[in-house]
Image (spheres, rainbow, N blue to C red):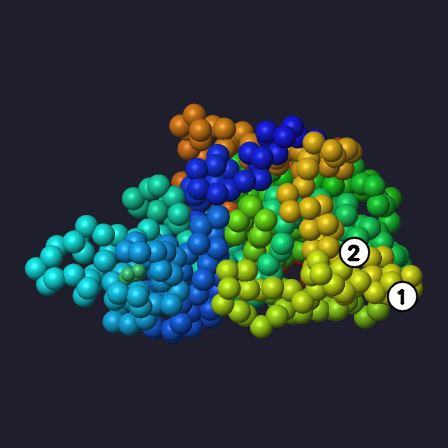
Amino acid sequence: MLNQQDNELLSKVGPGTPMGNLMRQYWIPFGISSELAEPDCAPVRIMLLGEELVAFRDTDGKLGLIDNYCPHRRASLFFGRNEECGLRCVYHGWKFDINGDCIDMPSEPAESNFKDKVKVTAYPVQERGGLLWAYMGPRGTAPELPHLESNMVENTSIQIYQRECNWMQALEGDIDTVHTLFLHLGLAQYEDAPEGSWAWWHLQNRAPHFVAVDTEFGTLYGAFRPTEKGMNYWRFANFLMPFYAMTPPGVLGLGSKFRAWVPMDDTHTLAISVNETAPGGRKPPSEGNWATGQTELHPQGTGLFDRFRCVGDRENDYLIDRELQRTKSYAGLPSIFLEDQAVTTSMGDIVDRTKERLGTSDQMIIRTRQRLIKAARALLEGESPPEPDHPEWYGVRSGGAMLPVGVDWVEASSELRKGFIKHPELDLAVIGGIPAV
Ligand code: FES
Ligand SMILES: [Fe+2]
């Protein structure tokens, strides 16, 4: 539960808000390279942290992200001509480069120096592993991109979906391991999963013990279940400032992934998942009582909220199938992603946290909210967050592991939780069974 003031502080990200200011300290992923596939291709409308922007790739292949509104008389630069290293407003021909400088003003007399005084807001963009990143912060020189492993190794995939609700309630689903056993796997039995796999352990106990701690990069939880041999089966997952979640993909140490919950505005969020494809791949489930369908997307449109839009949405109740719910899957929704989509958007555009009743399994959520609120308040007092200057802190993994009963779980798992390290001793075979969520 949060009071109204803290709930607003946590949720709202527009220019000048405390959380918006905090997010602008970090690099923000906002799209994929193929949206701007070649030099001088069509510009793309981007909504990011409540700002209407236009992204374009110039003649030299460089990327720009500028204010949607032309500084002359406010026509949209989306309609601009992308030509000769700049975006030219079609209303009166003013032209802007990727730095936001006005490089041509054909509507003013040739001797005028007015163009040298005009600029449009422009944010630096970087491209890494097929992902587009923006820096909307105050520094003259942007920090380094965070060392997120799955965006830096080969064999990764990127998947993006838009979610029509506030970013934080969406993110909270990813740091809430218990919902997996109900929403996604409520009818699955442990016997359905291969013996020794994470799902086999996971499904035997739907109310694990929880511990959560602060880390340098954000927060970390461990959920554990006793097994019969003096060992505990643990699942570790990370939250990384300011909006990344690493849900456990399977065996800790064998793969990397993250999901960024990027606020487009206060009520629309991009879920950007970057998953390293495990060598040999993950076994698809042969059979089982869970949603196995795909999350279908509409074709990409040009509107601010027409990118990565799911076919299942509020209007059609996310394509719920009550017969499927009676017989085969707990929620009766077509895919795991739409299951999450339905429940988190059903809370409303911005969930009213003054009315919730949190239990012991919500302690990671509580800790993460406090971490974010504290960082936003510290920034108001002039204290910048440390993470942007420590990109190496982001090189971590999540997953499951067996640990002896009684050990210090943070210490005992630390080597396996580090990124960019190979662990040939670990067995990929135990990943199979039920897809990671
Ligand atoms: S409004 Fe853009 S050039 Fe006039
Ligand atoms: Fe989920």
Residue assigned mark 1: 323
SS for callout 1: helix
**Residue for point 39% across, 57% down:** 68
**Residue for point 74% across, 63% down:** 316
Residue 313 position in % (x across, y down) = 69, 61
Residue assigned mark 2: 184
In this image, 407 relative to 31: left or right? right
Reply above or below: 157 against 198: below
- Based on the displayed image, in which of its 4 quarters is residue 184 positioned? bottom right
* Cα–Cα span, label 2 and label 1: 16 Å
Amino acid on which the number 2 mark rests in the picture: His
* Figure disc tally: 2
In this image, 391 relative to 433: left or right? left
Residue 200 position in % (x across, y down) = 82, 55
Reply above or below: 254 against 79: above
Front disc: 2 or 1: 1
- Based on the displayed image, in which of its 4 quarters is residue 307 positioned? bottom right
Dot 2 or dot 1, earlier in sequence: 2
**Residue for point 87% across, 65% down:** 324
Nearest the eye: 133 or 403: 133
Residue 185 position in % (x across, y down) = 82, 56
